[in-house]
Image (cartoon, rainbow, N blue to C red):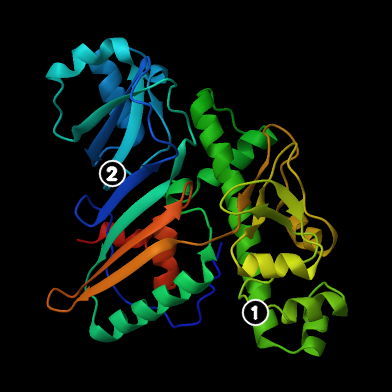
Amino acid sequence: MERQYYLPHSPIEFHFRQSARDFVVDEIPLYPFSGDGEHLVLHVRKKNLSTWQMIDIFSNHLGIKGRDIGYAGLKDKNAQTKQYISLPRKFESVLENFEHEGIKILEKSYHNNKIRIGHLKGNRFFIRLKKVNPTSAMKIQQALKAIKKQGMPNYFGFQRFGLDGQNYKKGKAILEGSLKERNKKLSQFYINAYQSYLFNGWLSRRIEISKLVEGFGIDELSKILPFDKDEIVSMKAQPHPFKLIHGDVMMHYPYGRIFHYESAEEVERFNKRDISVSGLLSGKRATRSEAAAFEIEKEFDSITNGIDGARRYGWIFPEEIEGEYKEEEAWFELHFTLPKGCYATVLIEEIAKREIQSDEEQD
């Protein structure tokens, strides 16, 4: 699926490879830990290990099952990442002789509850781009200014789809009954990849529509878009590069209840970052869009059984964006914070205006 990028600049050439030196992630917890309770909380740093691999290492050392170890989110393997995990406090003494070349325990605390999936506010990223010439550095700075002002699309990153990008096909086949996967965790992973594929397709289509609205007149748009003239006039009047459509499912930002876009008041609230548009993770029991927005969403809503659906922010607003060009090394270094569940590589791809997965094969 060809991804639509919203920034107007031409593609920027640079080299990016996920590695422990050039890709650093620091998890931001959802709440402060109480300092007391039956759960031991570890702030850990890992290098070149997935979160699941790290949990396996701890569970083998402690002699407990992986499900007894709590974590808030999965972190990249090809990176240096810091995150919080929890385990029963009674195993604290067993950690005194824990050593692993890829894992370092930075600090300990205690809490009343086990850390669970989603118990994080977001992640702080450091990314180093290489082989950046001065012209590209200027373009990157301009792109960062635009993202800081306008936000960015919340695509699922390539990591979601496997090394060959084909995991979604397995998920589709599982739901259709043409493929059996006995490993329940793997089956769920493949199905989630199919949901993500459909979401990305919807988001790309919406960005394509938004760019058409920016670039053409009302009469021309009436001929190429499946909306009445009043809807097109409404979209044309919106200053934000992502155009809302009546019936869109909106969500309070960065978290909160959902509701449908009905009036110009929602457009203003979107511009102020009080709310954001959401896309569908196709499945059962999820809120669907209505009216004109439904005409686009229904093209990417093909899962009717086998898994629950949900809503996901279609547009996000990165925070604390900083960029520094080091001309002597030809490096451009980025710092930024994203909400939970969002992919730093998507921001890099928006800047580059191309997929960056292939860079991992380079030196």
Whether residue 244 is visible here, answered yes or no, is no
Instruction: Give the quadrant of residue 211.
Output: bottom right
- Amino acid tagged 2: Thr
User: Is residue 335 left or right of 282 when viewed as pictured?
Assistant: left
What percent of the width, then of the height, locates residue 47? 22, 41
Instruction: Give the quadrant of residue 176.
Output: top right
Is label 2 in a helix, a strand or a loop?
A: strand
Mark 1 highlights which residue? 239
Q: Quadrant of the C terminus?
A: bottom left
From what the image shows, is residue 207 above or below residue 125? below
Residue at 29 percent of width and 9 percent of height: 90
Is label 1 in a helix, a strand or a loop?
A: loop
From what the image shows, is residue 108 above or below residue 153? above
Mark 2 highlights which residue? 81
Relative depth, front residue between 225 and 128 = 128
From what the image shows, is residue 12 above or below residue 163? below
What percent of the width, then of the height, locates residue 240? 62, 75
What percent of the width, then of the height, locates residue 177? 67, 32
